[in-house]
Image: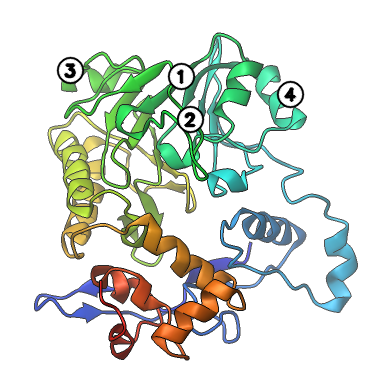
Amino acid sequence: MAEVSPAHGEPTRGERGDVERRGLAVLEGSYDEGSFTGVLRQPRSQADLEAARAAVASCPVHALRLSPPAARARSAGALGAPFRTWPRRIEDDVWALGHPSDKNFNATAYFIERPGGGVLVDLPRPSEAVFRFLEEHGGVRWIFLTHRDSVRHHAEFAARFPGCRRILGAADVNLRGDEHNEATGDVEVQLRDRPGPMTLEGAPLADAELAGAELAVFSQPGHTAGSICLLYRGRFLFTGDHLAYSRRLGHITAFRLQCWDDWERQTRSVRRLAALAEAGHLRFTWLLPGHGEWHRLEGDGGARATASELQRTVAWMERQAPGHVPRHRFVPWVQSRTSPRSLLARAVRAIGGEGPGSEVWVLPRAVRAHVPDHRPEKDAPALL
């Protein structure tokens, strides 16, 4: 596919606390001023083009565009729907389902195929094609919801697979539902935060039992208060929006700009994972996030290699500013950038002034340096 990467680099804080950036050799003209992403390599084959179209369809804020040259327009049109060749097997009995739902912010959903019914990790867009695939591969016994942003359609999937049990962090349960989230008060398993690993039903697992556990759950609050991760056979870690892999940084990272609960709490959560790996109990080879590319880590997949990866993540997280980003400030910032001609965008720019970075004042000061076109002089209008 067209390789997409941060156009301006993610900021980190140096020893003196100042913000540092590293640029990337993205293709000229492949991103707009202030964009988070640019293109490293254009599609070179039909398979590349299919993957690029899937990436475009998956972007929750429509930040990617695919504009094939006129000579290739006919072949591009013949490709069909972006996810017509999905689901895709990642390895062994683990699948990426594709068919993302915009109601779940186009997060990637996964399926673990198991005798007696598999585990659906987060939810794709419901369709007969998806239901048929799941039925043909043993059905669904568990629906594992990593956090509150990925719960849309849970009732529809539960109705299609009677007897399946839904799992969600208790702190992310929404009793009434709202414009962003479905009500989840009827979820069968609501997991409380606890420092150690647990079973799908929430029973404690001893640290030493992790190596032999087929499935283990970790409470990992921070991105949201009820974020949870799932470990399968000591090889696959499903992280939702808690952790992802950064190709630019070359290690596992987290989303500071989309931290809804508390960054320091999220850092402590990852520190708990690192401690388990350092003690020889936790290992994984595949990192499977809701947003970002799935990634096979280098090394032998043992506890020592896992500990090294997570230690780098913790060190990076500790260099970022503490705090969180309130939704009521993040949403208008995103909308002002994705719909620049809207009334909201014009109002935001009227306060912040025209030009690059005029919307950044909406965000908390602690995260503004994470915006590629941040201009400190644009901070003046912000009273918050």
Which of the image's four quarters has the N terminus? bottom right
Q: Say which label, 1 or 3, has the lower sequence index.
A: 1
State the residue in front, 91 or 160.
160
Q: Which residue is mark 4?
A: 132
* Mark 1 and mark 3 residues within 8 Å of each other at the beta carbon: no
Q: Which residue is mark 2?
A: 183
Give the distance between the C-alpha atoms of the residues marked 1 and 2, in whole angstroms.
8 Å
**Residue 192 percent across, percent down from the top left:** 25, 24
On the image, which quarter does residue 321 sit in? bottom left
The amino acid on which the numbered mark 3 sits, given as a three-letter code, is Ala
* Mark 1 and mark 2 residues within 8 Å of each other at the beta carbon: yes
Q: Secondary structure at mark 1?
A: loop
Which label lies toward us, 4 or 1?
1
Q: Which residue is mark 3?
A: 206
Name the residue: 53% across, 72% down: 344
Q: Tell me, for residue 186, which label it has, or none.
A: 1
